[in-house]
Amino acid sequence: MLRLYNTLTHKIEEFQPLNPPNVGYYSCGPTVYDFAHIGHARTYIFADVLQRVLEFNGYKVKRVMNITDVGHLTSDSDSGEDKMEKGAKREGKTVWEIAKFYTDDFFLMLDKLNIKRPEIICKATDYIKEMIDLIKKLEEKDYTYKLADGIYFDTSKLPDYGKLTGQTFEKLQKTLKAGARVDVVEGKKYPTDFAMWKFTPPDVKRQMEWDSPYGRGFPGWHIECSAMAMKHLGDTIDIHTGGVDHVPIHHTNEIAQSEAATGKPFVKYWLHADHLLVDGAKMSKSLGNYYRVKDLEEKGFSPLALRYLYLTANYRTQLNFTWESMKAAQTAYDSLKSQISDLLPRRQAGKSQIAERSALSEEKLDKINKFRDEFTQAINDDLNTAQGLSVVWKVVKSNIPSEDKYDLLLLFDEVLGLDLKNIELRVKNQELRIPEEINKLVKKREEYRRQGNFKESDRVREVIAEKGYSVQDTPGGPIIISNIFIKKLIDSQGNSD
């Protein structure tokens, strides 16, 4: 039984999807105006683990994620510049160039962290029509009003507005007023009212703007997620995830506009990852504690060691990143890889499946089943990956046969996502002597990939292939394989059980 903490009800509940075994899952994606940092990485690893746990339990997951490339303003009060336009000015590029560059970099980070890509990835700029149609519905139901700078949602007309926060409508008004910025939009009926469509100011030419029944302009940030989620998953979806900072405004407004438009519950289960601190403080460029995954790599850390670190804590609690904790995670991850490597020769001499272990004693069979059940119970207890890792180390230290130990660890890694299955390839690859010329080409290709120059990286891959080698990209880094090695690997797999 899978149990998850639902932010909407503020309690842990048994997961019961609307249409089992199918699960509709929407996870908030990035605003692609700058590099994603390790705080973002924690949220996306959490979202990935959730998908893996659902699939581990036999559910068929349809996951949708947005790419915000328009409409996210620098102020939560619906004022300030669009972050995308601001990023373009900062770098002297077009908004479209900014969006592509940082989208490519974002997915490169996901790949390094072994995060599965959602089945459907939606760019906001591809769904302008759906957003306008949703605003029309809300207008017809008298939930909107017009100001000089845009079309706004009247939150006072929704009796349960703010229910995700656990606060009353009146309490939310006081909270927002107390923390209001000086640039609050003039004419708002209530502080919680929010923009669904913003007009392009007179005498201003934006790089991203569209015609609408209300005037030329661009969509607000909140409307995109509702429009895209309902487009692909229906009026009511099973799961919606994001960072805890989205609860009071972004996700609260998603609920408001979606439920006002359809008259149905928008999301059954809301899940949120808590903040990442760095040395006990909020991450900030001004404090010098702002890190990307790339920064960790330059210090010699594996991105998957960062994933291991995040798995050691509950996703609903704040996690404090320090270089000491990063070193400890790298040591633990390296040790686990070493244990897997040691198991490989012994596993290849035995059976490779857990089933039909009639030759084992009843004691060892019980241990295998107990480990499997203990791991399943851990991850099904609101994604308790820390306890899941504890079971992993119990298996490593146990006296069950090596082949079963190996298969259990790979089974668990379907959830943990530490890419343990590729260790076999790495170990075998170390037996080969790779020419220095090939090594240099692979390094050059990695440089192009980091720069987002995928055209050149593909060209170098072709050169490598012409010289008799192939490159397999893994979260732990590229693996160089010769054509001879591939043939041996296929032959060995063909002869194994």
Image (tube, grey):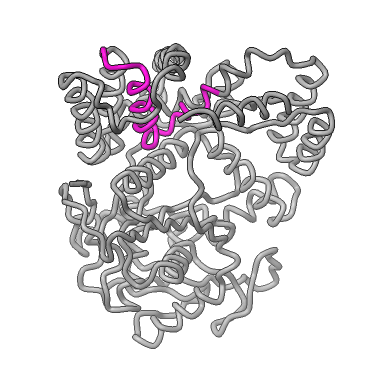
Q: Main secondary structure of the magenta part?
A: helix
Vertically, is 49 above or below 309? below
Which image quadrant is residue 405 in? Answer: top left
Q: Is residue 410 magenta?
A: yes
Residue at 44% x, 77% y: name it: 134
Query: Is residue 160 left or right of 414 when viewed as pictured?
Result: left
Q: Taking 428 as reference, is 258 above or below it?
A: below
On the rendered structure, is 392 left or right of 290?
Answer: left
At horizontal 57% and vertical 16% (from top left) the residue drawn is 300
Between 295 and 307, the one nearer to me in the picture? 307
Q: Quadrant of the C terminus?
A: top left
Image quadrant assignment for residue 62: bottom left
Assess whether residue 189 is covered by the magenta stretch: no
- Determine the image quadrant of residue 385: top left
Specify whether 46 is left or right of 6: right
Closest to the observer, 418 or 130: 418
Q: Position of residue 445 (x, y in %)?
A: 75, 31
Q: Position of residue 13 (x, y in %)?
A: 16, 51
Q: Residue at x 59, y 57 (%)?
A: 69
Residues rendered magenta in the picture: 398-424
Please state the horizontal and vertical placement of residue 147, each as a whole percent of the image: 47, 77
**Up/down of 443 relative to 5, above or below:** above
Total labels: the figure holds 0
Is there any visible trace of residue 423 in the rendered image?
yes
Tell me where residue 204 appears, x and y as whole percent: 69, 68
On the question of residue 173 being in view, the answer is no
